[in-house]
Image (cartoon, helix red, strand yellow):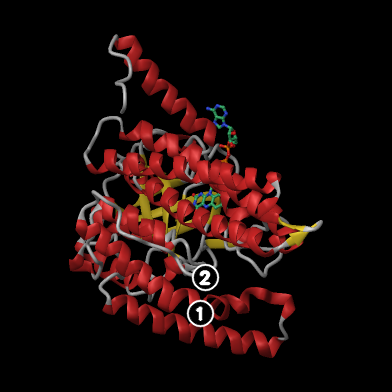
Amino acid sequence: MAINVTPIPGLDPAINDLRRRTAHLINTEVLPNEEEMWRSRRGAELTEDERETSRRRSIELREQIKAKVFQAGLWAPHLPKEYGGAGLDFLSLAYMYEILAYAVGASSLFGIAAPNSGNASILVKYGTEEQKRKWLLPLIAGEMESGFSMTEPDHAGSDPRSIETEAVRDGDHWVINGHKWFTSNGIDANFFIVMCRANDATGEMGTPGRMTQIIVPTDTAGVNIIRGIGVFGHATSDHCEIRYENVRVPIENTLGLVGQGHQAAQDRLGAGRVYHCMNSIGQMWRAFDLMVERSLVREVHGGLLKDKQFIQGFIAESYMDLQSARLMTINAAEKVANDDPDARTAISAIKVFVPAAFHRVVDRAIQVWGGAGVSNDLPLAQMYLTARVLRLADGPDEVHKILMAKNIIHRYEEGTGWNFGT
Ligand SMILES: Cc1cc2nc3c(=O)[nH]c(=O)nc-3n(C[C@H](O)[C@H](O)[C@H](O)COP(=O)(O)OP(=O)(O)OC[C@H]3O[C@@H](n4cnc5c(N)ncnc54)[C@H](O)[C@@H]3O)c2cc1C
């Protein structure tokens, strides 16, 4: 199994070169070690000793690969060079993420695993020098983990302005009270960026729309992790339910300005959605390769799967899904890179279209593989769950459709309509 990358005609030569270098690392370092790196996740299939040996081997392999990524100058590609990143521009990153996502878990080997990567970007943009020293640098170096704690069980996550978690100023501290859930990476995190309604300098409580992000170390008294929420039938996960009960943190932990948290969260999620989509596309390529390659060798009812028209239909439909998702995403990435006023509409469009296309492609790949398709021997079952979650996380489909429709209708109300070809 290897990713097949050839130069794209007309693309900036520097981006083609980046694609080639990334694919080289994926093909020579990551894919050959993929099975061994993630073997320890096979829980019940391994004895206690086997799991421990394989866990240690996995850490060793991952450290070796990370060292190679560092040497190649591709670690934390989304962050500025002054903070130890590769300082790549937006479009280069989009093309790179497509390639990275082909290999299972490669994001953590390149320092771009969520939610750390998004949190690092907010810290770069809004953090004070002290916050950068204390939280950003260890996060980039892989010495710390983090979570982003916004969604609440009792208020609509799809309407984040409705959150109720309060931060009340008490001298030179905030006192935080609230109930959150689905804070990913909650088990391992050293700190959370918590979205709160905070009182401003005059002591007045922020209105629902005026939110504030506050850095909360996870070992602060009153940060009570209630559970890792079980999802898709698994007993537990690292998506945590948390109660913040009289949590006291210094005012210096305010990230950005009081009342400006919504904008910071939009910065984090907005353009990041393009990366998520390129990640999905990389995984779609993997599912597509697995599907077609299986069809070449599996015989059923006297013939190879590739010769059955149902399967040919799966292959053709998946090709169309993949190509349309990819072109839409590249178009959105170009709009973001060019500060195009239609970028938000394009981002919402891919946020709806790509996870659904991803879901369809993986679903067909599973079907072609039969029972093996849902087993842990292949990455397809995990991809299937990921694709489903992506229709909810970072804003459910319906919210993005509403946003798109509003932007489009507005143009017609203004009398200009939508420009052809944009
Ligand atoms: C695996 C996973 C990981 C996550 N990680 C994080 C994380 O790290 N940090 C974090 O803060 N959150 C996280 N989330 C939460 C996620 O962002 C929310 O689940 C999502 O925003 C939806 O919010 P909600 O669950 O409260 O659903 P609700 O807001 O209750 O929405 C329910 C449904 O209502 C419908 N709907 C919403 N608005 C409209 C509308 N205007 N018109 C019509 N229908 C509408 C949609 O179908 C929507 O799915 C994660 C979620 C999952 C599943």
Select label 1 or label 2 by which is in front.
2
User: Observer-nearest residue: 301 or 162?
Assistant: 301
Instruction: State the separation of the CA atoms marked 1 and 2.
Output: 11 Å
User: Observer-nearest residue: 155 or 345?
Assistant: 345
- Say few, some or many: other residues with alpha carbon within 10 Å of mark 2 (under 14 / 14 to 19 / 20 or more): few
Percent coordinates x, y for residue 299 in the rendering: 74, 61
Name which quarter of the figure residue 190 lies in.
bottom left
What amino acid type should be assigned to the residue bearing mark 2? Met
User: Observer-nearest residue: 133 or 355?
Assistant: 355
Asked if the beta carbon under badge 2 is closer than 8 A to the nearest atom of ligand 1, the reply is no
Percent coordinates x, y for residue 118 in the rendering: 37, 56
Name which quarter of the figure residue 193 lies in.
bottom left
Name, please, the residue furthest toward the left.
82
Query: Which residue is drawn at the image coordinates 59% and 85% (left, top)?
Result: 54
Asked if the beta carbon under badge 1 is closer than 8 A to the nearest atom of ligand 1, the reply is no
Q: Which residue is mark 2?
A: 1
Query: Which residue is drawn at the image coordinates 41% and 71% (left, top)?
Result: 26
Q: Which mark is residue 142?
A: none
Q: Is residue 371 left or right of residue 38?
A: right
Percent coordinates x, y for residue 378 in the rendering: 64, 66
Please tell me whether mark 2 sits on a helix, a strand or a loop. loop
Q: Which residue is mark 1?
A: 33
Q: Is residue 77 left or right of residue 325?
A: left
The reply to whether dot 1 and dot 2 touch (C-beta < 8 Å) is: no
Which image quarter has ligand 1?
top right
Q: Does label 1 or label 2 sit earlier along the sequence? A: 2
> Is residue 216 in view from this perspective?
no
